Each structure stands twice: as C-alpha cells, then as structure tokens.
Image (cartoon, rainbow, N blue to C red):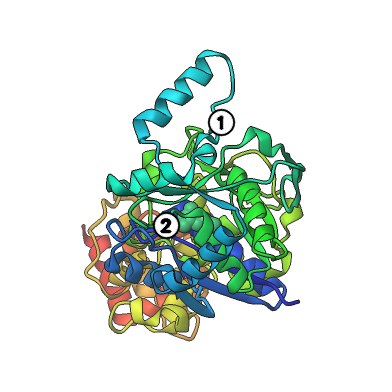
Amino acid sequence: MSTVTRFAPSPTGRLHVGNIRTALHNWMLAKKHGGRFLLRIDDTDRERSREDYVEAIRADLAWLGLEPEDEERQSDRFQLYQMQFDYLESEGRLYRCYETAQELELKRKVLLGRGLPPIYDRAALQLTEAEHRDFAARGIAPHWRFKLDRSAPIEWEDGIRGHQHFDPAQLSDPVVRRADGSWLYMLPSAIDDIEMGITDVLRGEDHVSNTALQIQMFTALGAQPPRFAHEALLVGNEGKLSKRLGSLGTDAFRERGIEPAALVALLARLGTSQPVEPIADRAALIDSFDLSTFGRAPARFDEAELERVNAGIVHQLTYDDVKTRLPEGMGEEAWLAIRPNLAHVGEAADWWQVVTGPIEEAEIPAEDRAYLAEAARLLSWSDDPWPALTGALKEATGRKGKPLFHPLRIALTGRDSGPDMKALLPLIGETEARTRLERAAAD
Ligand code: GLU
C-alpha cells in the first residue's frame, strides 16, 4: 500500500513555523515512499474559518514548494460525517448528553477535590427514553459523546515515541458533536483519514491523547488505524512555544529575505539527530528523512541558525533561480561574483550599486594616495585585470599582502570588505575603475 499523508490545518489563522514543519514532514514522508501528500482543510468551525486563510495556506504551501496532490475540505463532507455518525449511533457507540458546561465543571471539581482523575462519569448513559423526551419537550437538544470501549488497553507503536499505552478507563468519552449539530474535530478527522486512505498520521505530540481516542473510532468504524507518529513540539530560544514563534509565518520570513529552501532545510532536520545543513537539493533531504532520527525533546527553533542556513542556500542559488529578483542589468557573471558575499538575495542590489556606482567615498590615508595614483597609471585591461594590476603594483612598489590589496579595494568599492576583487574588477570596467583610483588618489 503506497504511503498517503495529510496536512490538516484549520483555516482560523495563518500558518506559523510549527504548522509549516508539520506540513513539511508529512510532505517528505509521502515523497520518501513515492506516495501522496494531501491537504485537508479542517473548516468544520464555520464561524472561525475564513476563506482568505484557506487561500493563504495554499499560497504558503506553494511558496515552500509543498504542493499537495489533492485537497479536501471538511465543510464539503458533512454528509459523509452524518452517515458514519448514524452508523456509530446504531452500533451504540454514541450517546446523548445534556450537561451544561457549568455542570461538567462542577463534576470535575468534585472529582479533583477527592483526588480522583476528572473523567466523565457517563451519567447520561442512565437516562431513560422518557427523560430524553422531556429534554426534547423543553427544547434542549443533546450533545453527543463517543462511548469508549473500556475492555482492553489502547496501544500503538508510535513512529517517534515508540510503544504507547493508554488505559481507556482513564479517559473521558469524547464529545464529538455539539447540541447545535456542529462537529468537533475528533470524529470527522478519523472519518476523513479512513475515507481518504491516509496511511500515516504525523502530527504534534499535543495530539497523543487524541490518537488514543481516535484509534477506537477507527476500530468502531471497521477500519484499520493508520500508523501514527507524534513529533516533539517546536520551541523558541527561550525554551517554549513563544507568542513570537506562534505568529511567525511565511510573510515574516519572506520579508526578511529568507529563502523557502532555507526554511525547508532547517525544519527538515530540526529535532532530529541529523545535522542541520543548507541542503538545497530536495531529493537529498527527502532521501535522508527518517522518523527514527526524531528525538523526544522539544526541537529548538533558532533564528540565528535559520540565517546561517539561508546564507548557505543563497550561495548555491543559480542565476536562473534569482534573475527576476536582481536589479536591472545585473547579469550572471555579476551574480556569481557577488553571491558568496550575500546573506540574502536582496543584498545583491547593494553590491550591484557598488559595481555600477556611484560608490560611497571612503577616507583614504595620506600614505596610500601616491600608491593609488600609481595604480591608476598601471591599470591595464585584459580578461583578468586584477592579477595584472596587483602583480604590476607589487613589482613597482614592493608592497605585498594587505597594504598591496586593501587600499585598492577601498578605492574601487568604497568598502572595507566584499566580493573577490578578481571577479569584481572586470564588472566595474576599465574607465570606471581608473576614475575611482584617480579620485581616491586625489582626495
Ligand atoms: N486541524 C487539526 C489541527 O490543526 C488537525 C490535527 C491532525 O493532524 O489530525 O490540530
């Protein structure tokens, strides 16, 4: 059976770095096994779901290069949920409840006060048909709970956490449907995973106890549960999922000049025992993806590390990758000359400005002026003018090392450091280079 994974965001906000990581890992897991990666829009909550968020999710996935093979929306699938709901009800796995939130809270408090776990007491199971009719006559509709099978432990081999074991007697029967008929997350998700043929559910460890409940739903619906794996949560430098991390999305990264490939390379390996490296080749990343390398400790998202990976990725981008983002007139040679100096593609424009001029006027120490005048005289043009110039200057002046090279860099670029002058000088051109050297000599 080929692997089918899904990413199931609720369109109640923009994706943040934690969701992006989940999407990426599901995508990689599917690709690694030649399978399919699906997008499921969890929009059962009609009030909080928004169409612009759905579109933003699609656009974010496209920007990251994680396009799904197919997309489903839960709001299109209510009929299916109703059908399965009816089946579960007929099997006696769903029951009607009427407790208000306050009543449930009170029950919880009483149990906790007695030092007992706050498990729902199944009081509603004792209601008679006459009592149900009485609620209906008073216009009180029931909400519905899924009745857990308490006859055997719930167990699974988690792809990351290893063997998992839950005692269903320690779990409350989950509410699956509200009194207004709307669906809670739990049951539709299990129904969809079955109907969409999902073979692997990979999600955050905040879903571990949901998995215990959903495994019983799969079984009650006559389906084999998929494989489950729960990854440790993402935390910021301060050691928790900060507000900042929870709102950090693709827009913020794009604005800061982070390449999607950098985010992918970092998130692919974060929280695993494999080194984070600026791997631009997706096939290589996919190939090395391995759930068994995932750790149980929270994965630390470090923005400085992202910047380092980004620079490493930028240094591998080809001219074709970036040409639409470069300033007018900047060609392949210029890109290749400047690229090693960039942390972000956007900085190429600064260096292109250095090439085309005008450059910032730098302070030239008096002792370098005659030297630069000599340089202007000795500048001769060829395919490779830099070694010719520095060779001639070395011979004429006896300078070597920094005193030989550094004043030239300052005079020619107005900056202290930057791309290799051997690559830069041909781009500046003979006339402009001579003018800059003469101007610096005259200062
Ligand atoms: N919509 C759910 C969430 O965002 C999906 C969880 C799941 O992957 O099953 O948490």
Nearer to me, 292 or 140: 140
Query: Residue tagged by mark 1?
Result: 119
For the residue with label 2, is its CB less than 8 Å from the closest atom of ligand 1?
no
Q: Is residue 3 left or right of residue 375?
A: right
Location of mark 2 (residue): 183
* Furthest residue in direction front, as rendered: 130
**How many labels sit on residues?**
2
Up the image or down, 282 lies above or below 103; here it is: below
Percent position (x, y) of residue 397?
47, 60
The numbered disc on residue 65 is: none
Q: Amino acid at mark 1?
A: Ile
Q: Earlier in the sequence, mark 2 or mark 1?
A: 1
Residue 17 locus on image (x, y percent) = 45, 53
Along the horizontal axis of the image, is 287 left or right of 363? right
Secondary element at tag 2: loop
Residue 413 percent location from the top left of the image: 33, 64
Q: Which residue appears at 41% of the width and 81% of the height? A: 380
Question: Residue at 35% of width from left, 43% of height from top?
Answer: 134
Q: Residues within 10 Å of mark 1 (few under 14, many from 20)?
A: some
Pick whichever, 119 or 205, lies toward us.
119
Residue 196 location (% of width, % of height)? 58, 74
Picture residue at 42% right of the left edge, 69% below the top: 78
Check disc 2 and give the amino acid type: Trp
